[in-house]
Amino acid sequence: MALSKRELFQKRRLRVRNKLRKVNAGRVRLSVHRSNKNISVQLIDDVQGVTIASASSLEKDLGIVGKNNVEAATKVGTAIAERAKKAGVEEAYFDRGGFLFHGKVKALADAAREAGLKI
């Protein structure tokens, strides 16, 4: 029986996360979630099990409510980098989940790098 699209996505997400955990022990995880209408990102400390900072296209102060395009992803990326600096995080590893590193996900990562977060 063939796997469904959702099952393939979950397998890909776990494969990516497990590979990254082996290499980046002790660093915070920058986790991205992209839906059809929005994009969000979180800085997660897996050792303590705590979310340090987050940013989303649903936030009104970013001015991109309900948009999911490259421009929105760029604004979310710069916002998470600024919030990470305020929280004292300079270095994180990028967890793209099951999403391809292309388009909106890549734009978010590039914007976070340009704003000073080491990914």
Image (cartoon, rainbow, N blue to C red):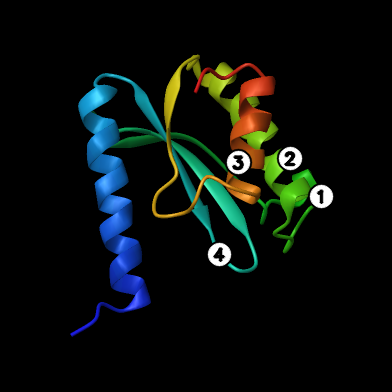
Front residue (pair 34, 5): 5
46 above or below 86?
below
At which x and y percent is residue 80? 60, 33
- Residue farthest to the right, as pictured: 63
Q: For residue 106, which numbered disc appears in the image?
A: 3
Asked whether the beta carbons under mark 2 and mark 1 sit within 8 Å of each other, the answer is yes
State the image coordinates of residue 56 (x, y, percent, origin top left). 61, 49
| Distance between mark 3 and mark 1 Cα atoms | 21 Å
Q: Residue at x 64, y 36 (%)?
A: 77
Q: Is 45 left or right of 22, judged from the image as shown?
A: right
Numbered circle sitting on residue 75:
2
Residue 35, which numbered label? 4
The crowd level at tag 2 (other Cα within 10 Å; few <14, some 14-19, many 20+) is many
Q: Is residue 51 above or below residue 92?
A: below
Farthest front residue? 2
| x and y percentages locating residue 102 in the rendered image | 59, 47
Disc 4 element:
loop
Of labels 4 and 1, earlier in sequence is: 4
At numbered mark 3, what does the secondary structure look like: helix, strand or loop? helix
Secondary structure beneath dot 1 equals: loop
Q: Looking at the image, is mark 2 or mark 4 earlier in the sequence?
A: 4
Checking the image for residue 63, the label placed there is 1
Q: Residue 56, relative to residue 90: is it above or below? A: below
Q: CA distance from mark 2 to mark 4?
A: 16 Å
- N-terminal-most mark, 2 or 1: 1
Amino acid marked by disc 1: Gly
Q: Which label's residue is closer to the chain start, 3 or 1?
A: 1
Mark closer to the observer (3, 4): 3
Residue 89 visible within the image: yes
Outermost residue, bottom side: 1
Amino acid type at mark 3 = Lys
